Amino acid sequence: MEEKKLDLNSILGFVLIGVILLWVLYNNQPTEEEIKAEKAKKELVEKQKQAEVDEAIPQQKNEAITDSASLAKYKSQVGAFGYGAALASNSDEKTTTLENSVLRLVISNKGGQIVEAQLKNYKTYDSIPLYLVKDGNANFNINFNTSDNRNLNTKDLFFTPTLSKEGNNQVLSMRLKTSDNNYLEYKYIIKPDEYFVDFTIHSQGLNGAISNSNPVTLHWNLDGIRHSHSIKYEDRYTRLTYLDGAGDVHKLGQGDDDEKEENVKWLSYRQHFFTSILVANQPFKSAEITSKRLYKDESPEEKYTKQYTAAVPLTLQGGELNYNLHWYFGPTYAKELNKYSEYDLTDTIPFGWGIFGIINRYIFTPLFGFLSGFLPFGIAIIVMTILVRLLMSPVTYKSYLSQAKMKVLRPELNEINEKYKDNSMKKQQETMKLQNKAGVSPMSGCVPALLQMPIFYALFMFFPTAFVLRQKSFLWANDLSSYDVIAKLPFNIPLYGDHVSLFPILASIAIFFYMRMTTGQNMQMQQQPGMPNMKFIMYLSPLAMLIFFNSYASGLSLYYFVSNLITIFIMLAIKKFIIDEDKIHAKIQENKKKPKKQNRFQRKMQEMMEQAEQQKNRK
């Protein structure tokens, strides 16, 4: 009985608590004024959010759509695409911005094309923001005929923008409409921290608006904006490059050039250290491309290097356009381009051709990237130079050994020259006999030099195009990818320029002493007919270095200076500690005593010289 009473009391207590709570809630409910204030506050927040959207996305005014007379006027001008023109009739040209941490793109609703492309992490030589597209230097346009025989260009028509997000990606749809559901669409998708932008061209419901009997042509034109102190130097590495369907890379000439190519996978408008690339998932059937030099001389007023154009026929499928493309606006930097290896974009970098390009691409580029990862860039160049010279020291040894042998033979060669000074043919015969008996070949000194040529040329291409050296300083050089300046001249010297660079001077001095060591002993020998004047070469090479490299990358001159300096020390070490001329002389004398067999080539040469001598005696 007590338990039932307790249960009843509990129930009554809960009921009482509930009644009290209801009474409290009733007495504390917001007044009508408070409800209105809260509603107004929410509306204000919504308006602010909408304002932000309106600011990010230009909204076309639709008043013209309700005006049948205006719509008819625009349709009389551009046919079915007058619907899109009517949407924009009361609207100025507006833009939408897509950006991530590295790239900022501005797309205009007029033409639906990119009107600004800024690389956010880079500056020009004069420290202003770096743009690949700006101030009307680029144009992207599709030219087509309508079914009612109008010729239209998308660059003249207005697109309707819609900005949205897909995960972390920003998506911009630009639609050129003929009605609410029929349109030509450009879609841009920009991903976080990438220079690579997905881009599609797609049409819906235009199979009755675009003529099938006339060509549809995509035009992409760009004037390369100057980014470097020297426009001439920048122009040396500014080229239109493209990849064909077979995977082969082609380049237009340095001057004015044009070409038509079948099956083009991508077009690269390279501007030395930066490039704009249009990539096709499926190769374009063909492309007519041109390159034209725009600047006249080395002047601060010159703003553009080259003008690039491309005309690409597009194919309608069922009367519609459907192309999956990509844009790359970014540095010509292997580290970045390697991220898109499936498109072979790294091939736009001028590594060099053949074996030289292979050495540059797979040896020097990774090696320098490794060294510069923990060393200052100038020190990294010096360390890489030391490694290269140590690697080539066996070749240096062979070269110097050959010179040492020729030096030992010099007295006997001088005797032959004096004895047969009036008979060049006989002199040549006796010289060859002596060299053959002694086991010395004049060509043995040339072979080591030839073996070094691939290294020489690969490094010649590496330093001016190594992106990691751009705007990196060392000692008095402000930019290792450009020339250093220690004095500015008040006039311009042809071939030399209007400035004095110190690194080429140092490299020229080092080359002079190197040439003196390697050719000095040859100059003491009597000059052979038909052979180059070694004294002339000894002075010509440093002079050529001084003039030619005055406007080249200071990193390259630094390499040649250090390289020749190290080579001099290596040769001095070989001479002092490794090569013993007395032993070489003894070895040659021993070789002369042994019967020497001639190879087929030597026998043939001997026979030809004997025949020539006999003919001369008959006369």
Image (spheres, rainbow, N blue to C red):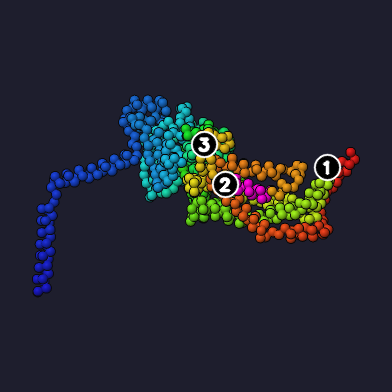
Q: Amino acid at mark 1?
A: Asp
Q: Evaluate if marks 3 and 2 touch, with contact meaning CB atoms under 8 Å apart.
A: no
Tell me where residue 245 sits by quadrant: top right
Find disc 1 in the rendering and name its residue: 422
- Viewer-side residue, 16 vs 278: 278
Q: Is residue 58 magenta?
A: no
Query: Where does residue 609 sit, x and y in percent of width and height?
Result: 83, 45
Query: Where does residue 470 sit, x and y in percent of width and height?
Result: 49, 46
> Residues under labels 2 and 1: Cα distance?
44 Å
Quadrant of image for the C terminus: top right
Find disc 3 in the rendering and name its residue: 489
Q: Bin the neighbour count of mark 2 within 10 Å (Cα to Cα): few under 14, some 14-19, many 20 and up.
A: many
First along the sequence among labels 3 and 2: 3
Position of 491 compared to 616: left or right?
A: left
Q: Evaluate if marks 3 and 1 touch, with contact meaning CB atoms under 8 Å apart.
A: no
Residue found at x 37% / y 33%? 93
Element at badge 2?
helix
Q: Which mark is residue 266?
A: none
Find disc 2 in the rendering and name its residue: 506
Element at badge 1?
loop
Quadrant of image for the N terminus: bottom left
- Viewer-side residue, 54 vs 316: 54
Residue found at x 36% / y 44%? 164
Q: Name the outermost residue toward the bottom.
A: 1
Q: Name the outermost residue toward the right.
A: 618
Tell me where residue 94 sits by quadrant: top left
Per the rendered image, the range of residues in magenta is: 507-519
